[in-house]
Image (cartoon, helix red, strand yellow):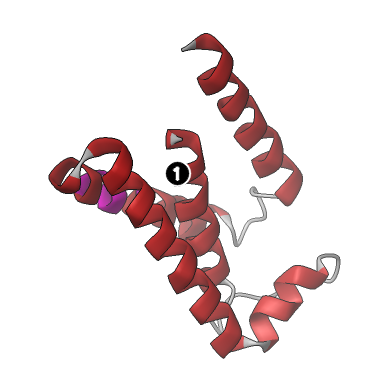
Amino acid sequence: MATLTIALIGMAFYIVYHTSKRAVPTRFLKIERWFYYNETKTKSLSIMLLFIALSLAIILWGVAAGVLTFFVVLMTWGSLIVILSPIRVFTIKHLSVLFLLSLFSELFYL
């Protein structure tokens, strides 16, 4: 559940990042171009994802700790995406593998 919450926050910020005019969409990923050219739909999708992630964090850790954890994770993801996305360190494949490894370790080793 924590992995899902953290992944939703990261995905929502990544989507919002691609609505920026400074973010240049890649030629290869159609989804990034869709994010870039459909700004209003993309922002509403990311707000929905952030609301779901905040709700999951509150359910998982309680109100005060959930809100605090949500904002700490949001700031961490935001910093990483803003710094590392322009130099193309993040790819969908890397993030998918990281998410799956984290999810399996949370489910099977706890």
Amino acid residing under circle 1:
Ile
Provide residue 19's location: percent of width, then percent of height.
56, 80
- Using residue 26 as the reference point, say whether residue 74 is left or right of it: left
Query: Quick one: 1 or 41, which is closer to the camera?
Result: 1
Q: Residue furthest right?
A: 28
Residue displayed at 32% across by 38% down: 60
Residue displayed at 27% across by 47% down: 58
Residue stretch rendered in magenta on the structure: 68-73
Which element is circle 1 on?
helix
Q: Residue furthest top?
A: 109
Q: Main secondary structure of the magenta part?
A: helix
Residue 17 magenta-highlighted: no
Q: Which residue is mark 1?
A: 6
Q: Residue furthest left?
A: 64
How many numbered circles are shown?
1
Provide residue 97's location: percent of width, then percent of height.
70, 34
Residue displayed at 76% across by 44% down: 93
- Using residue 45 as the reference point, say whether residue 98 is left or right of it: right
Q: Residue furthest front?
A: 59
* Residue 26 can be seen, yes or no: no
* Residue 42 can be seen, yes or no: yes
Provide residue 18's location: percent of width, then percent of height.
59, 73
